[in-house]
Image (spheres, grey):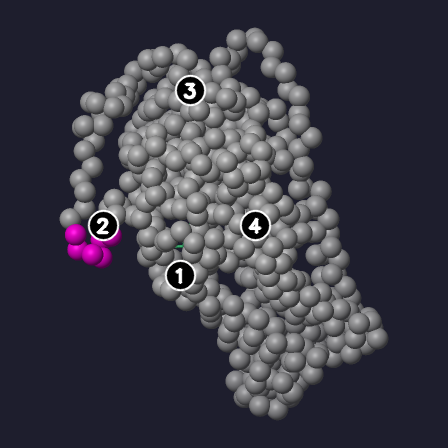
Amino acid sequence: MTIPAFRDQRELPDDDRYFSGLRDDDASRQGWDGPSLPPWPDQQQPQPQYDQARYDQQQYAQPQYGQPYAAPDSHRRGDIVVSSETDPTGWKAGSGVPIRDERPPGESTSGNRLFTVLLFFSGLATSVALWLFNTQAGAISDTATMMIAAGRVTGLIGGYLLFIQLLMMSRVSWLEEWVGSRDLLRWHRWLGTSLLTFVVAHIVFIVYGYALTAGTGVVEQGWTVITTFPEMISATIATGLLVFIALISIRFIRNILNYELWHLIHLSSYAVLLLGYGHQIAAGADMSGRFASVFWPALGCITIAALFWGRIVEPLWLNARHRFSVAEVVGEGANTFSIYIEGKRLDKLPVQAGQFMRWRFLTANGWWQSHPFSLSAAPNPQWLRLTVTIAGGHTRKLATMRPGTPIWAEGPFGTFTAERRTRRRALLIAGGSGIAPIRALLEDMPPDTIVIYRASRPDELVFRTELEDLAEQRDAWVRYIVGGRNDPGPRRLFTPDGLRGLVPDVNRRDVYLCGPPGLVDAAVDTLKQLDVPDSQLHLDPFEF
Ligand SMILES: Cc1cc2nc3c(=O)[nH]c(=O)nc-3n(C[C@H](O)[C@H](O)[C@H](O)COP(=O)(O)OP(=O)(O)OC[C@H]3O[C@@H](n4cnc5c(N)ncnc54)[C@H](O)[C@@H]3O)c2cc1C
């Protein structure tokens, strides 16, 4: 199948005629198998030299830093900006022009989040209440009984947090939709640290409490607990695994570990549940009451059902229904390419512009890896498109995939979508490969949207024609900010003054931000200084 040059496919009827037009008009996007990509460093080949002077002189005559920027053509939809006092929307702060602020019925997740938080704390309170109802008045009379009580409470909280952690890893779509994948990730990290803290506290309190009661040393008592209490060997292994998972999740260690290895070790948290649950049931004095004997198994069943549903049933259904495969791989820029994907019943695929899916390309040398990539064009009944920037070994291999390669996908995930908009206008900020979901989102955005696209070098900019065509159709504006991380011009544009110069009404817009975590964090700092409320910030940092 050959993919036609970009047109808004959603406006086209659902038949095959639209694949008949070859991309004759755009030779660089013909069927492409990757030979023009720069050689990978490990191949010991000379790297192509980037000629900054040539770009500056020929193609992108840029204004000098500090000089007011004058667009060569005031009607152009996209300009490379280094330093700007332009007014892309035709509205200036303080000009007195009233701005209508009709809010779209934004689908906010804050209500869902509040409900989820309440549910979480009710469950937590119930777990602790089990100890409270099981403890007679006056039972805590000295340090030893106080330590043992603290050990029981922290053990109950640890057990509860373990279930919740696994529930959040289940990838069930309703949880993602309700909370948003970014908040889920944040909660997962926060709960991971809390879980470890409570488990360690549980061990310390219990061993110390029993040592005080028995009048023995802590080490001796610890050994007695491990060797004589029921299910203690498995609980010790579970604790060891938990500590190991926590260690490899520290950002510094995680960054130096290969992702697949890290992920494999991380998955051993299922074993923590199995090993730890036996100990909870066998040794937990607060697990056997009438209510407790319903509460804990119910929590276990919900968690296992969610894991089974999210990890097995939903992906099986998705792939059986849509049968995705690679239609074509097309070069987009220096180290960026697009993968067009075909499949059955794509009109029924519940994915939106801005969302991502996890893609497992079933090639001989990469089928075991599943990587997240966002759609780079709004979905349509004919094809899906991903746009990938080469980051490492796997993405490099994807560039040489053949049409017809079968794909196993999971998702869609994420709440980085137009339906979460709360204001009438939007600002989209993309950095590097973050342009993929931003490019797709632009198709769903209202008039007057401004796109700021940050890249280190002009040859890293992709989709210029598409972005500017879309901007023309949708009455939007594209501003490219090009330059290295330390160049003063681009740096200045990400200060409050610089950003206000580019987008005077920034705090009245929804801001969608996607790119490397560093860029997203820096931009969020600036936006906060410009009084953009949290409810208007939609973030999609490419992090796991
Ligand atoms: C939600 C999300 C959406 C993304 N969308 C896009 C996109 O549209 N276009 C694009 O070019 N890139 C996207 N990325 C980044 C992309 O997934 C990584 O660049 C890619 O997985 C790198 O794989 P690699 O083996 O080539 O590189 P490596 O050198 O192995 O990894 C580079 C970095 O990518 C991350 N990474 C590696 N493997 C995985 C994995 N299986 N799952 C999650 N992260 C991983 C790690 O942080 C790693 O440090 C997205 C990432 C996330 C989290």
Q: Bounds of the magenta span?
A: 40-45
Q: Which residue is mark 3?
A: 77
First in residue order: circle 4 vs circle 2: 2
Q: Can residue 59 be seen from the camera position used here?
A: yes
Q: Which residue is mark 1?
A: 363
**Residue 129 horizontal side relative to residue 195, left or right:** right
Q: Nearer the viewer, mark 1 or mark 4?
A: 4
Q: Which residue is mark 2?
A: 39
Residue in the foreground of this view, choosing between 361 and 49: 361
Report the residue at 78% width, 78% height from top.
288
Report the residue at 29% width, 31% height from top.
458
Q: Which mark is residue 344?
A: 4
Kindly identify the amino acid type of the residue bearing the numbered disc 2. Pro
Residue in the foreground of this view, choosing between 121 and 46: 46
SS category of the residue bearing label 3: loop
Can you tell me whether the CB of the residue at mark 2 lies under 8 Å from the nearest atom of ligand 1?
no
Kindly identify the amino acid type of the residue bearing the numbered disc 3. Arg
| Whole-number angstrom distance, CA of label 4 to CA of label 2 | 36 Å
Residue in the foreground of this view, choosing between 370 and 127: 370
Report the residue at 63% width, 45% height from top.
348
Picture mark count: 4
